Every structure is written in C-alpha cells, then in structure tokens.
Amino acid sequence: MIVTPQSMSFSQPLALRSGASIRDYSLAFETYGTLNADRSNAVLICHALNASHHVAGSYAGQPDSEGWWDTMIGPGKPVDTDRFFVIGVNNLGSCFGSTGPMHVNPDTGKVYGADFPVVTVEDWVDAQARLLDAMGIERLAAVMGGSLGGMQALSWTLQYPRRVRHGVVIASAPNLTAENIAFNEVARRAIVTDPDFHGGNFYEHGVVPKRGLRIARMIGHITYLSDDVMNEKFGRRLRSAVAEAGNAPDGVDLRYSTQEIEFQIESYLRYQGDKFSEYFDANTYLLITRALDYFDPALQYEGNLAKALARATARFLLVSFSTDWRFAPRRSRELVKGLLDNGRDLSYAEIDAPHGHDAFLLEDPRYLGTVRSYFERIGQEIGS
C-alpha cells in the first residue's frame, strides 16, 4: 500500500488547556482506504510518544518506510482498509510535520523553541476534531490507539461522546503511576542538563542535545521491554570482541573496562539511543512526556474514575498484555471497572505475551485476532 503524507493548515486560534492558544498551525496526516458515501466508516488512529501520522503503508520509492502500525492496518489486516477509511494524525508539538517547537511562531517571527505552548492530550483531541470537521466527518466508526494513543482514544470518548461509536484502547491507562512519572522526569532531566540544550533554544546555536536524547531513549526503551524478553534476547552475553579478551592489548582486560561497551544489552541500548537522537526533537520529547504526566480525566471528579467515564457513550475494546509493567493489566482493569459501573458495553482481552509494553506493536496472533474480530463487528454495524 503506497501512501502520501498530507498537511492541513488552520488559521483560527486553538484554545489550549494551559490558557494559552496557538494559531496558524498545521497538522500532518495520512489516510488509507476510501471514505464511504455516508461517511460512516472513518477510523482515527492516535499515536504514541515517538510515532507519527505515518501509521501504515510505505512511501513510493522507499521500500523500508512501513508505517509504525503496519502489522495492524491495511488491506485484509485487522483494521481492514478495504472496509474502513483510516486517518493518522501527527499531534501538535511533534517533530514529524505538524507545527512544533522547531517551527516559526507567527507572533514573534522566531522559532518557538522552549516557548512552544504546553499541550495536553485534550488539546490534541480538540485539534484532531478540527481536522475531522474540515474533512466533513461528523462521527467516527472508531477511535483507536496504544499507550499514549490509547489515552487520546479514551479522551475522545469523553470530550466528544456523540462523535465516537467505538473506543479501542490498547496497552494504556487512566493516568500515569508515580513510577511512570518518575521515569519521564529522569529522561527529561537527561535532556535539560545536556550542555547543548541551551534552555530549549539549541536551534539558535546550531546544535542538538544528543547526549540527553540518547539517555532519555535508553531509559524509555528499558521500560518498553519485559525482563523475560531482555533475558532471552541478551541475557548476560558479552559482545564478541569483549568475550575474546585475549585479543586485547597487553595489560588491558576489556571485560572490566569502565569505558567500553561490554554486554550486548549495552550495545543495543546505545544503538537505540543513537538512532533516536538523530531524528527526534528534544523540546518535543519534553512536551509529549508532560502531556502523558498530566492526563488524568478523573482529576476533576475528585479521583473518581467511574464518574469521569460516565460521559462516554461509546462501546469499547480494551486490550492489555501480561508482561507490560509500564501500563500493567491492572490499569486497564481500572478502566473496565469504571465503564462497567456505568453500564457500558465493552470487551476486554488480557493477552499473555512475553514482549512487555512493546507487545501492542508486534504480531501476536491472539492480539491481532481479537482486534480483527472487533472490527468485523464494527464493519457489520455500519454495513461496510
């Protein structure tokens, strides 16, 4: 499936939850499949922290450019683009085409940098709703996302309950635990204490705080994998050059060097960190992790999640994974209970998978089969 990125500009200011607003902004997006005559088969996909609007398919002439959820979305796949019109949107503040910190602030004529306004999950949903308005889509067959994307899907059902038939919330939670907030804060501190960060205005200095980004990504990646997967994939294995320490210069024992990469897991994490630092924006990382931290729909209801979820009228599919300790199954069960307390129609699947949080991106047949069955039901409802 060959796809083409698109962009839409909005001149009208968007009021943000912080009290600020943003105007003359653009949203990058992609669509897959065909919108039917009564515009009832639209499915919105919300992305997680380091993903984008490029959800599925490939770009012409770029064979290795598959979208981040290509296992899930496409012709004949669980979210079948022969039946559904799928939309992927890049969030405000991201670094993959939508207006973000690296773009020019129309009020000052200078790059936003650290002055880009704080954004929340709710702000992203409002921006997505504007895009759908412009596309003439009044109601979604479904809104779907994993992790942070699942929070957006949930928020859609609360902010615009009449515009959503089904909410598909995967490997997500009603809010972050203190432990999760702590991981995000350590990652942010790695970035802001990098000498190349320059208070978020590193663009003006022609540098990138790559050291901080590398560490932030390494921290994040540890939390995405399960202990079982790490042990199976890497264990305590040394890199081959270290294992063959007999090749080291006289008097140097690489096995106990404080500078060399010794274990395979170290090599893997550094590779992931290096790759991330080449394409991700540091200010974007700060913005998006803060949005994760702030999300808590029960906060205005004195922590009562059932009361917060009473606004939702959609039907739901919730999926969690047994080894996901970043967004553990018990967090999905909190959502299940809150929805059931309100008499909502829902399906819940807890998949026994070894992959940790990253399982929502992988090809587990039970997981994909669950989503496929649910979307077949949606297709029957709308006659697609």
Image (cartoon, rainbow, N blue to C red):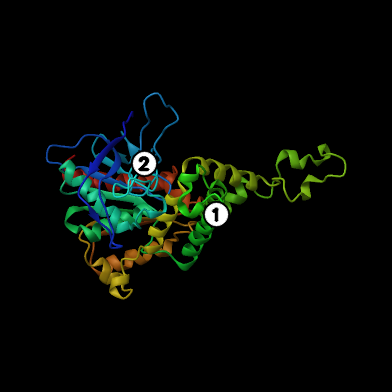
Residue 355: % across, % down: 50, 50
Seen in the image, is 208 located left or right of residue 76? right
The image quadrant that residue 383 belongs to is top left
Residue that carries the numbered disc 2 in the rendered image: 72
Q: Tell me which label, 2 or 1, sits earlier in the chain.
A: 2
Mark 2 or 1: the one toward you: 1
The image quadrant that residue 19 belongs to is bottom left
User: Mark 1: which amino acid?
Assistant: Ile
Residue lying furthest right in this view? 250
Residue lying furthest left in this view? 38
The image quadrant that residue 3 belongs to is top left
- In the rendered image, which quarter contains the N terminus? top left
Q: Badge 1 local density, few (<14 within 10 Å), some, or many (20+)?
A: some
Residue 347 seen by the camera: no
Residue 180: % across, % down: 47, 62
How much space separates mark 2 and mark 1, taking CA atoms?
Answer: 27 Å
Residue that carries the numbered disc 1 in the rendered image: 219
Q: Which of 105 and 184 is in front in this view?
A: 105
Q: Which element is circle 2 on?
A: loop
Q: Which element is circle 1 on?
A: helix
Q: Nearer the viewer, residue 91 or 76?
A: 91
User: Mark 2: which amino acid?
Assistant: Met
Residue 42: % across, % down: 22, 43
Q: Residue at x 27, y 58 (%)?
A: 16
Residue 384: % across, % down: 19, 39
